[in-house]
Amino acid sequence: MKKLDLLAAVLLIVGGLNWGLIAIAKWDLVAAIFGLEFGETNAATRVVYGLVGLAAVYGIVALVSRRQVAATRPTAVSATR
């Protein structure tokens, strides 16, 4: 699972940087990597964008499940009681 967590994190970083570059510089990093102009897509860029989207869904599920686990975990009893 840790490899999947790492892959999801890398994809989310790539996606976040790409959107930041689009907003700030009107430059699409993913399109540029594949030799395309801003706004152009091909099968490879759509795969990358799809993987970034799946990574976001995976991240949401991971956060929700960790929060539920933390909420059901018993708290430590204070030693001063």
Image: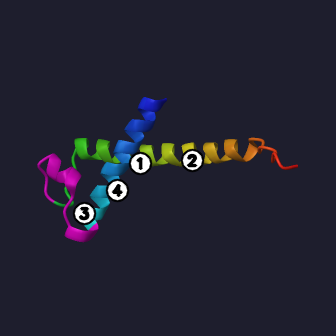
The region drawn magenta spans: 23-37
Q: How many discs mark residues in the rendered view? A: 4
> Residue 31 colored magenta?
yes
Residue type beneath disc 4: Gly
Q: Secondary structure at mark 3?
A: helix
Distance of label 4 from label 2 (alpha carbons): 18 Å
Report the residue at 15% width, 46% height from top: 34
Residue on which the image places disc 4? 16
Give the residue number, with chain letter if any, for mark 3.
Answer: 21
N-terminal of the two: label 1 or label 3? Answer: 3
Few, some or many residues within 10 Å of mark 3 (<14, 14–19, 20+): some
Q: What amino acid is at disc 1?
A: Gly
Secondary structure under the numbered disc 4 in the rendered image: helix
Residue type (three-letter) at the residue carrying disc 2: Leu
Which of pointers 4 and 2 lies earlier in the amino acid sequence? Answer: 4
Residue that numbered label 2 is attached to: 63
Q: Is residue 68 left or right of residue 81?
A: left
- Disc 3 marks a residue whose amino acid type is Leu
The circle drawn on residue 53 is 1
Residue that extends furthest to the bottom in the rendered view of this protein: 24
Percent position (x, y) of residue 57? 49, 47
* Whether label 2 touches label 3, CB < 8 Å: no
Relative depth, front residue between 10 and 26: 10
